Image (tube, rainbow, N blue to C red):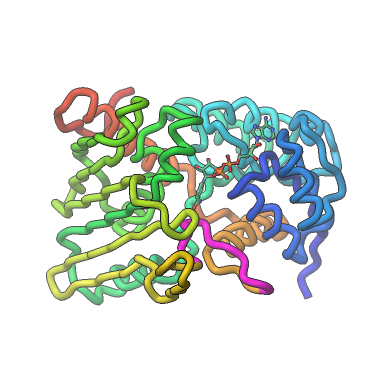
Amino acid sequence: MTEFKQINVGVIGTGWVGGIRANACAHNGIVDQIHVAEINSVRQKEIIDEINPTSVTDDWKNLISDESIDVLVISMTPETERFPIVMAALKAGKHVFVEKPIAPTIQQAEQAYALAEENNLKITIGYSRRFDPRYVYVKKALRDGLIGDPVTCLVSRNSTRELGNKITGRSKMSPAAIGGVHDLDFVLWCLQPRKPIRVYSQTSGKLFSRKSETPDHQWVMVTMDDGTTITVGVGWILPIGYPNYVQAWIEVIGTEGALTIDDTHKEVQLNTTENGIRYPLSSMPGEPVDHVFAGSMYDETGHFLEAVAFDRPPMVTKEEAINVMSVYNAADLSVERDEPVILPRNL
Ligand SMILES: NC(=O)c1ccc[n+]([C@@H]2O[C@H](COP(=O)([O-])OP(=O)(O)OC[C@H]3O[C@@H](n4cnc5c(N)ncnc54)[C@H](O)[C@@H]3O)[C@@H](O)[C@H]2O)c1
């Protein structure tokens, strides 16, 4: 049997997603202690009830200075305030799992990777679609040549307006940077080794624009170096149905076939006299159902814990993380300039 030492994990920010990560760690035999930094006292109490962590603090610096902690999961918001925490964690010799985006700019992301490399640490970013079997099947089907040479890929994703409302309150980041990032990572990963060479994007806004600068929707069109086209659309104004409901539709058309993934979560319907039809188990990061987890986040978290415990490389590479950032940055620039942006850019 391979020898391994159990590891201690700190989770900074145990809201919706950080709460799932903390529970994923608590269910994982690789983990010994879990330490939590959370500023919301209600969430603190909830997470204590859920996983009984070894320690709870409202100051993330206490987790940085705790030498017993091997890994920090950074899930706090706003996203724009995370970079100093990432750098402090790496300076203190901790492996880092950070929700997207890894940093506000490509230069800062490169600094984080350089520091991780210098200190012999692992760093990864939460690109959860890579742990959904249906999405992985697209990668495998393309690699195995099942639909020939890819010609065009479409991902259209829409979530309910509660998500749009939440993001409007906390961040000025675009739909491409906040939500489209997952789909861009997924499609670019599937299409490797092709590289993006041109990006055109438009936003549309009629609802949130009444009260803020947040667009309702963003289309991103990417041309790859072999001529394959990608269209990724992300919006967050669906009427509220099931909490955090999200629906996605994926089409990959190739010279010898087509692949369609219906990720609209219609497979489980709950119809009640009180609420009408609802679609349980349909949120993007997934949710627990008694002893199992409906979604990819437990496997994704476990993958990083294993990477640390057994000294394996995390799945998302530095080049992939930077590549995705350069595409959504180009998309935002395209919106600003109202013209296509050529990649690679000399930043
Ligand atoms: N991978 C996915 O599928 C996926 C899905 C949704 C969201 N996300 C990402 O996950 C991240 C978290 O999103 P969320 O919806 O869980 O946010 P959230 O607002 O529900 O949770 C953030 C938590 O951080 C806490 N917090 C804020 N400042 C803090 C600080 N200084 N120290 C400690 N805790 C602090 C808040 O009290 C809150 O509980 C975001 O970056 C989001 O983009 C990923």
Q: Which quadrant is home to the C terminus?
A: top left
Nearest the viewer among 228 and 213 is 213
Prevailing secondary structure class for the magenta stretch in the rendered image: loop
Q: What span is colored magenta in the figure? A: 281-291
- Number of numbered tags placed on the structure image: 0
Nearest the viewer among 32 and 40 is 40
Query: Does any portion of residue 121 appear in the rendered image?
Result: no
Residue 328 at what x, y percent from top left? 33, 37
149 magenta-colored: no
* Rendering quadrant holding ligand 1: top right
The residue located at (49%, 56%) in the rendering is 243
Q: Name above or below for residue 5 compared with residue 343.
A: below
Nearest the viewer among 285 and 124 is 285
In the rendered structure, the answer to whether residue 153 lies left or right of residue 235 reads left
Q: Residue furthest front?
A: 273
The residue located at (28%, 68%) in the rendering is 142
Residue 236 at what x, y percent from top left? 36, 45
The residue located at (17%, 58%) in the rendering is 152
The residue located at (44%, 67%) in the rendering is 279
Q: Name above or below for residue 170 compared with residue 27.
A: above
Q: Which quadrant is home to the N terminus?
A: bottom right
Quadrant assignment, res 129: bottom left
In the rendered structure, the answer to whether residue 99 lies left or right of residue 56 reads left
Residue 25 at what x, y percent from top left? 71, 57
Residue 107 at what x, y percent from top left? 46, 26
In the rendered structure, the answer to whether residue 48 lies left or right of residue 252 reads right
